[in-house]
Amino acid sequence: MLGFSFAELLVVIIVVIIFIKPDDMPEIARFIGKLIYHGKHNINKIKKHLKEIEKEIGIDKLKEEVNQSIAEEKAKLENDITIIVDMYGNEHKIPNIHEIRNDIKKEDLEQEITNRNNENSQSIPL
């Protein structure tokens, strides 16, 4: 609440009760209420003005383009990574294995992985 702890707020309230006359409290409360109202009103005006500026500049289109570029780069990175799962179920991400071993065809690698997985699943006692 505006950076005040409950103890600080309590001290302020006690000081106000001690030093301000009871007749002046409603007037002070109205003044504080008006300040808060005008402050919120001005903040809302500024927000509205900033949104209009964003529309004029085209920030929304820029955000869409940036997000699209990020998604495309992420997709490229995901395609360049091979995930290997060890016998304990831990995933290991390595650079694309085809870049490391150009002599292995993708189909041969997938067949070898399938064969190894089948062998391991048959040899592990349940």
Image (tube, rainbow, N blue to C red):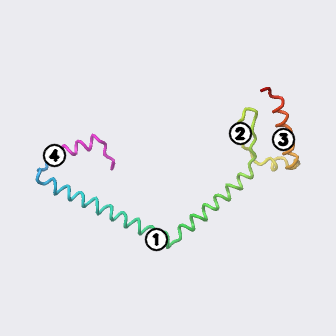
CA neighbours of label 4 inside 10 A, class few (<14), some (14 to 19), many (20+): few
Look at 33% across and 65% down and name the residue there: 42
Q: Identity of the amino acid at label 3?
A: Thr
Look at 28% across and 58% down and name the residue there: 36
Q: Label 3 to label 1, Cα distance in Å?
A: 57 Å
Q: Identity of the amino acid at label 2?
A: Glu
Specify whether residue 4 is painted magenta. Answer: yes
On the rendered image, what quadrant is the C terminus found in? top right
Q: Label 4 to label 3, Cα distance in Å?
A: 80 Å
Q: Identify residue for label 1.
A: 53
Residue 91 coordinates in the image, percent (x, y) = 71, 39
Highlighted magenta segment, given as a residue range:
1-18
SS state under label 3: helix
Mark closest to the chain's N terminus, 4 or 3: 4
Q: Identify residue for label 3.
A: 114
Task: Judge from the rendering whether residue 95 lies leftward or rightward of residue 49; answer left or right.
Answer: right
Q: Identify residue for label 2.
A: 91
| Depicted 121 relative to depicted 59: above or below | above
**Labelled disc at residue 64:** none
Q: Identity of the amino acid at label 1?
A: Ile
Task: Judge from the rendering whether residue 94 lies leftward or rightward of residue 115; answer left or right.
Answer: left
State the residue in front, 30 or 96: 30
- CB under 8 Å between callouts 2 and 1? no
Q: Nearer the viewer, mark 2 or mark 3?
A: 3
SS state under label 2: strand
| Depicted 5 relative to depicted 40: above or below | above
Q: Label 2 to label 3, Cα distance in Å?
A: 17 Å
